[in-house]
Amino acid sequence: MINEKLAIFGGPRCVPEDVPEQELFGWPYINKEIEDAVLDVIRRNAMSSTEITVEFEKEFAAWQQRKYGIAYCNGTLSLQAAMFGIGLGAGDEIIIPTKTYWASAISAMTLGASIVFANVDPNNLCLDPNDLERCLSPRTKAIMVVHYGGHPAEMDKICNFAKKHNIKVIEDVSHAQGGKFKGKMLGTFGDVAAMSLMSWKSFSCGELGVLVTDDRTIYERSLAYSHYERNKPEFITETEELKPFYHLPLGGMKGRVNQVSTAIGRVRLKDYDEKIAEIRKAMNYFCDLMEGVKGFRNIRVDEKDGSDMAGWYSPNILYIPEELGGLSEEKFLEALKAETGYSGYSGANNCLHTHNMLQDYDGLHTGKPSRILFADRDVRELDKALEPSEKIRTLSIPWFKVYKPEYIEMYANGYKKVVAHYRELLDENQDSDVGGIWHH
């Protein structure tokens, strides 16, 4: 099959059109227990209550191996609450990887902090610990770590750096719920962790965010930030500075989650680890098949040290066009779609520092960009060192949910077939721009 004419030129497809895509890729999974839990909430008109949510928070925190958990209406608010929880505020700086989803970063500006962007490691797309020293200043309050695409960041190096400089660590686990780094669960390394559990994530609950921590002060500050109905004596018991402000949300917004989502989450906890174990088996098999294929390098961990890729949310593979005559991502993906039906994308997330909002946006109409509103230095000057992250090239790969070797092999053969015939796709108008998306 690989040696036959490319499908884009009329040859046979590597993946037949009747492949069971829903079985291979369908997500999230819904069973009767989930349906019954959701219907119970709806029939009781309990969407805006909290009794289910409080139970979910306890169960999720226990699963996450943390003392405290808080649910929010979305992952973005959970991350913002984590920033508020550690005391991030005007004049502080927070180090954030530039190649990530915007929610990991932009909330810092609403608290008056300045974002210092760090490079990501080209081998795993996570924050590069070797770039932290460059980003450091006396104003540095925290590091935001993102376990990108399910790949764990180098938490030992990052945490050692943070401890040395008395800096807080926030883990964004939105891509990696249930993952591990050297045998320890992601979300248990930092002072606080937060994550999205929205409908596309591997731990999917509709629209939901969760924060977990062992620190009582961070917990109470994060709760008071946007849970006005729980900013009261029954919940805020130890943090004296909060007590004069009971009953109103300190962040001026409502973070309460619809209990349809937390009802789903309680059921999801029961078999989530089992489900993502099968995802890992499937995705590792695909990567085994891609090992050594010209033009590509796998992004995955070596599981021998106890690390894993959680549920492999939004997986990517490194693309080296120079090995394929400079073949553009766009042309490769066009040929791949003809072979497999898979509509991939290039570039993973765009580098955030390249967006005008992170350069010139004056959200409060002060005449000064929001990113440096309370800063004593122009941290945008540091963006000049981020060219390595800008040059990283990736392609998405199919996100298999079940281990079906015969079908996984078909998709891998689609990549291999395009590689085998790459010269036929070359032309003098190759677009060499690095791709990327803002919304994933």
Image (cartoon, rainbow, N blue to C red):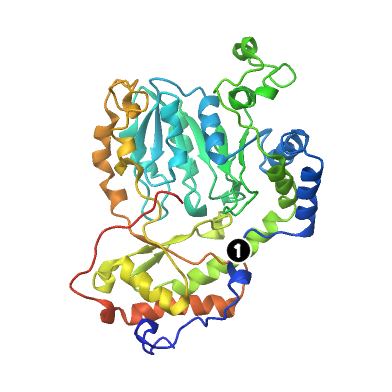
Q: Which residue is mark 1?
A: 279
| Relative vertical location of residue 185 with respect to residue 8 in this rendering, above or below | above
Q: What's the amino acid at mark 1? A: Ile
Residue at figure coordinates x 38%, y 20% from the top left: 91
How packed mark 1 is, by other alpha carbons closer than 10 Å (few <14, some 14-19, many 20 or more), is many
Q: Is residue 394 visible?
A: yes
Residue lying at 39% horizontally and 81% vertically, measured from the top left: 417
Q: Quadrant of the N terminus?
A: bottom left
Horizontal side, residue 383 vs residue 65: left or right = left
Is any part of residue 142 visible from this angle? no
Residue drawn at x 58%, y 57% is 311
Image location of residue 372, percent across then percent down? 32, 26
Residue 238 placement, left or right of 250: right
Residue 109: x and y in percent read 41, 29
Q: Residue furthest top?
A: 244
Q: Quadrant of residue 112?
A: top left
